Amino acid sequence: MIRLGDMNWVHLDEKIRQGMQQQNQQIIPLTPGLEADVMCVRWNDQSYVLKIWNKESRPDIGKQYHLLLKLGQSGIQVSRPYGWGKDQDHNQVLLTSYDGIPVTRLDQKVLRRMACTLNDIHQYPFSIAHTDADTEASKEYIPRCRFVDYFFPQIDKHADIYDRVNDVVQRVQIRQDHLIHGDYNLGNIVEMNGQHTVIDWTNGQYGDPRYDTAWSVFLITIYNGEEYGKLYRDELRTVSSCMLDEERAFEALAWLRWVLLSREGDVPRNSEVMRRMLNIAAHNLYLHTSLL
């Protein structure tokens, strides 16, 4: 049985610490991610989210905890972090506010809000003047990763994808000059009482907003349809110029990443998704349908 009081907390909100010894905690499993198990914890009419990284992925949750603190302070709507530490099996854990369920109703208003929020993330002012201590702290809580190694795991096992990805990467200069979410999609945007909150910052890092944007557009396109993908792309163009720079190349990188993930694990797919994948490849000079 999972109990918050049994965790080895590195940081924990004092009010949570005082109340967590109660016996009436209710644990409700939520849809797990590829990297962690997720559950809702309820007591005293309050709900929280507990995430346990008990799979192969081992991100630095201390950095994610501090990133959430800083983003919340900056006005970006993210879950409030209450604590992080490890469970009895030494798996990293993160306790945050419960902010609702994933957005399911999609229309132009929602797409506009998504576009504005993603632009706000990319404009997060981590590079503005700080004290030396704050500058060092920003380096600590926002990681910097090698693009191909991070977003294309196990690519060396797939020579056809490896060659195509390297060809595209050589044509564009990958930047690491903005904060990116790394997996901005409808599954990571939850809603409660009309408020949208961006969750799952495991992939948050210094990166290229063009890739972050392309991955987000790509997922809307293949899972919600070309019409919504176009509307979302248009909304992004009204708030950000990054869509105009090497758009097809970054679309290709998003497409190739999905193909790699589909070979290495389980990603949602059906006949309509595959039709949309084929359509993207047919209109992108960097891609070929034989890779599917």
Image: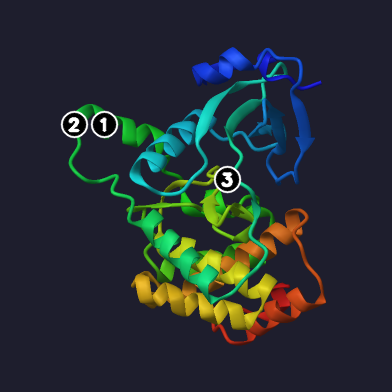
Q: What residue is pinned by disc 3?
A: 200
User: Would residue 281 appear left or right of 265 to someone viewing this image?
Assistant: left
Looking at the figure, which quarter contains the C terminus?
Answer: bottom right
Q: Which labelled disc corresponds to residue 131?
A: 2
- The kind of residue tagged 2 is Thr
* Vertical order, 31 against 65 (above or below): below
Q: Quadrant of the N terminus?
A: top right
Q: Quadrant of residue 227?
A: bottom right
Badge 3 amino acid = Asp
Residue lying farthest bottom? 283
Q: Earlier in the sequence, mark 3 or mark 2?
A: 2
Q: What is the C-alpha distance between the residues marked 3 and 1?
A: 24 Å
Residue 65 appears in view: yes
Q: First in sequence: mark 3 or mark 1?
A: 1
For the residues labelled 3 and 2, the Cα–Cα distance comes to 29 Å
The relative height of residue 138 versus residue 17 in the rendered view (above or below) is below
Could you tell me if the residues under marks 3 and 2 are in contact, i.e. CB atoms within 8 Å?
Answer: no
Q: Residue at horizontal 81%, vertical 71%? A: 270
Residue plotted at (49% across, 28% down): 62
Q: Tell me, yes or no, whether the two marked residues, 1 and 2, touch with CB atoms within 8 Å.
A: yes
**Crowding at label 1, few (<14), some or many (≥20) Cα neighbours within 10 Å?**
few
- The amino acid marked with disc number 1 is Asp
Q: Which residue does the image show at 35% across and 53% down from the upper left?
A: 178
- Of residue 162 and residue 96, the one placed in the foreground of this image is 96
| Residue named by callout 1 | 134
Q: Position of residue 213 (x, y in %)?
A: 47, 65
